[in-house]
Amino acid sequence: MAAKLKKRALAEFSHVIQEEPKPVKRLRLITKPAQPELHLNLQSGCTSQDILHALVILEHRFPIDHATAERIFPELMEQYSASRDTLVRSKILSVFTRLATVPGFNPQVISDQLLPKLQSEESHKVLSNLLSTLTTIGCCLPNSLAFHQHLVAAAQKLLVNAGHLVRARCLELIGELGSCDDKTKELLTTDSVLYLLGQYTADDDPRVRAAAYTAMLRLYERGQPLSQSVYSQACGGMNDDNEDVRRKAARLVWVLCRLYPESMVNCGSEGGEELRLADDGFAKICNLMNDISVNVRVEAAALLGSLHQVSGRFLEQTLDKKLMSNMRRKVSAHDRAKEQFESGEWSTGQRWADDKPRESVDAESISLMNIGACGAFVHGLEDEFLEVRNAALDSLCELAVQSPRFAVLSQDSIIDMVNDEIESVRLNAINSLRKLSKHLVLRDDQLDIILGVLQDYSYSSREALRGLLGEMRMATRESVNSTIMALLDNLRRYPQDRTDIWSCSQKVGQRHAQLTMMLAEELLCLHPYFDSPEPDTEDPAYVTVLLAVFNAAALCPTMVALFPEHTRRHYTYLRASLPHLLSPIQALEDAESQVGEKVVAMAATSTGDFLRQLLSKLSGLSSLDLDSAEQLLRICVRDLERVEALDSEVSASTECTCLFLSSQLILTELMKSTVRTDTDKVYQENVAASVDKILQQSTQLQTLYLGLGGELAALVRQTEVKALAIQLLFRLERASLGEKVRACNTFRQYLSLIKSSVDSDPTSYDNFTRQVVSLYDSVDWSRLQVLPEIFRDLSKLLRPATLATPCDVRKTTAVIHEPPASSDMPIKFPASLAATVTLVATVYNLEETNRVSILVRYPDQITQFVTPPLTSWTRLGPLRHRLVTPVMLSHSLWSESCHVELSLVVEACGEGRQLLKLQENIPLTKPVKVLVSPKSLKR
């Protein structure tokens, strides 16, 4: 019994488990099955419902090819002629409309069959659909002017039809196809077209009137000249009882104001007063700001902004607080309170009617001009719908940009909108003020209004306001002091805004150097007799104050004399830790730092010269033997790595060159290994690791560096081809049958990906790459016994490559601002629940933000990828983006607090890496450690 137990124990210890290799992931190409040939079969005695069902199925089959369209058209036309059901005929006409747009199908065939139907068709619905189909066909034949004339003449005859849909479709056809060409003057000239359309602006049906105005606008969009004679009709349409007519008429007035701004028109007063058409049209559009329809108000508010040629007096009236309402002046609540406060007493009764309403006005004193533009933007900015307020803000800002005087007048109105209850309106107001910053100076009362936004919960609002404060000019020292105090309060409420607050403080100090100098002693808490304690330079609030003071001192050197000794030391510390936020102060720069800056500038210049000299030494690399090439590449890579170690801010060209030459060094070592014939398994694994390293470096080159030219991109691809070819040669000579088949399939798939680029530009690739790519179609890849000899012969052509000139590229980088890397306060949350950490980062030289993810790594090595939503990204400039997004952290109970690592990664691109193993992500930043402490749930 003991012997059996001993034997069983030994058997258990000697048991070997062989792990099968994982199958290679292959690209799966899905080809959609060919659709069966289309058969309608509408002549088999079907009912109207069956025919409608067949036509609906036919529409779902679109798009179709022109051969199918030509085959089914006769059957559809026959059914259209035979059917008496209006629904069936209308549905067939909608199918004809789709057929007319099929590429390769001649729509003239449809029009030849449908034109005779215009005279015989009795149904208004079918006739309107028929006109719509003919309009579409006419648009598909833009060069058939004779056909257009024929359609316009037919539509003109049908304008007397009793159906409103028919008349509206006729007007639509005239607007789309009407012309003022000389060849068509015998039919309908532009004036006659406008006269014809103008007659139907007084039609009984509002849909026809709207179609008439739409046709006029369509003529203008097609390049046909509009006559000033339609202005009176457009003004009449703005008083129509239908909102769609009023919207179209307002747009037509806007068009005429832009076409004939200086023409004089009668404003309609009894004295026959004449105004510029731009001014009169502007006033009439302003009248629509009080329209009952929100859509009309939005349209009017949007149109006002692009009327740049309006007179200054009309612009100023749009902000006049003395609005007319039922013959009484409409005064704001602020003005009423001010007037009551200034009066100082109640009515004594000693004077007759001293307490009568003083805002009443005489009806005879009302001017038409005052009614038109007076208070238009005031109404728009106080509208109950946010769409109207946003449109009014946009137009007000656009007009203010064109006129500095009007910008100053509109300043109060825009600042009032900063306190709107809707976030989008607040952001619009802040951005509008930012556009006008060069014309405006903030007063103390205005600054008090906008500083309240820094307490807003929305990060977007706070960020936008900090950007505004950094660009606006302030009037007094109290304003600067209030701004800095508000920034400190913002830092206390929202510590994650630290980086933006520092940037804003820097800009405030730079733009208000003189005012900041007056506040220097107060901000630094200096006393004329007593020494103040030295503040902590790790305090973000103190850094905020220092950034404002130091940047002001760079423009006001006399301020330096006020600084105590510890403030001077703090300047040196901030110059080293935050150089991008601090301007140099010459009085505080010592001789060593100035020499250091000169050395850095000289190093930046010498780095480019060194790189060019290094590449010139490598110009004959391909002609050297492999041992000499390996030694030369090793020396060059070592020198470039030392340059990177000495200067952390080397250019992206140097890093890119070092990475490329490193891959060539590994490739050269692989080339030397092709002469070995041993079958050591460890050696084969080293070859696979070297190939994997080359593919990893080539993936980094193609992912992180923007601007790879055609030459460098070709060199990277042919490096991958050479590495994969060497690996394939080793597999064919030494591996098992299954590994050989998988290696051949992988290599052939890679060749299929790069074959098109090699064929399109063969001169960018060397002889080895061209011959290997030519094997894609000329070799039977299933004959494994022939492939080793072919690749062994081709391996004699293998040579390392180099760059001719330094590459001009940009490297994708990122900086995580929040959470801070040095935080010792743990984030506590109940175990198995979630806690939120706000991540704020700036990504540079990034084209596609959807390729960036957040990598969360827990202490037990569990990783999680978080894809930020598109709304979390803000574009700061070309290829520069800001990411602000919450990251959810959750884990089970821990015995003590541990760090969770957060970092940004970008999705890798590269054909070679993609075919060998699971696609990896390339890190953009070093991990930021966040101290987390999950606690047990209390029951």
Image: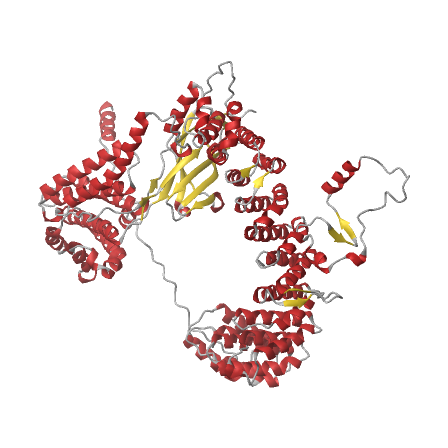
Up/down of 885 relative to 282, above or below: above
- Residue 701 appears left or right of 194: left
Comparing 929 with 888, the one in front is 929
- Residue 373 appears left or right of 131: right
The spot of residue 378 in percent (x, y) is 67, 50
Quadrant of the image for the N terminus?
top left
> Can residue 833 be seen in the rendering of this structure?
no
Q: Quadrant of residue 566?
A: top left
Comparing 496 with 44, the one in front is 496
Q: Residue furthest top?
A: 530
Residue at figure coordinates x 62%, y 52% from the top left: 392
Quadrant of the image for the C terminus?
top right
Residue at figure coordinates x 21%, y 37% from the top left: 640
- Residue 520 appears left or right of 804: right
Comparing 48 with 772, the one in front is 772
The spot of residue 938 in percent (x, y) is 55, 24
Q: Quadrant of residue 579?
A: top left
User: Which scheme is used to colour this image of the protein?
Assistant: secondary structure
Comparing 885 with 540, the one in front is 540
Q: How many marks?
A: 0
The spot of residue 309 in percent (x, y) is 58, 59
The spot of residue 663 in percent (x, y) is 21, 43
> Can residue 563 be seen in the rendering of this structure?
yes
